[in-house]
Image: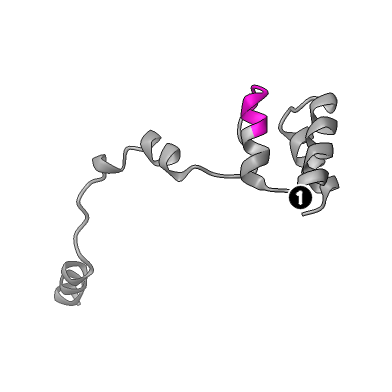
Amino acid sequence: MTYKDVANEMRANGVSEEDIATLIDQAKKTKFNPKAMDDALVTLGYDKIFTIDYDDIYEEDDFDEVDDFPSSEKIFRRTNKES
């Protein structure tokens, strides 16, 4: 990912041009690090862009409410009985 790509990604996510310039300058000095960039974005009041916190995603989903589906064995037996 080039610095131009990083800047475009930030623009697409609503980061101001002033903040983009500051963050890109900082990243050029220290080498681009997605976690550090996201930490800086959060500090400035933006959402994370370059990393995904899977724990946050799974907390919002209701996986425990999934219905119990029949096993493929039961489906196979039913299909063979009908034939």
Residue 22 belongs to magenta span: no
User: Residue 58, image x and y in percent?
Assistant: 39, 41
Task: Give the residue furthest to the top.
Answer: 45
Res. 49 in view: no
- Which picture quadrant has residue 29? top right
How many marks on residues?
Answer: 1
Magenta part of the protein: which range? 40-46
> Which residue does the image show at 79% across and 38% down from the upper left?
26
User: Residue 70, image x and y in percent?
Assistant: 19, 59
Q: Is residue 18 left or right of residue 10?
A: right
> Which residue does the image show at 79% across and 27% down from the upper left?
19
Residue for badge 1: 31
Task: Give the residue furthest to the front.
Answer: 30
Q: Nearer the viewer, residue 10 or 29?
A: 29
Q: Amino acid at mark 1?
A: Lys
Q: How is the image coloured?
A: one colour
Compared with residue 79, is residue 31 higher up or lower down, i.e. above or below? above
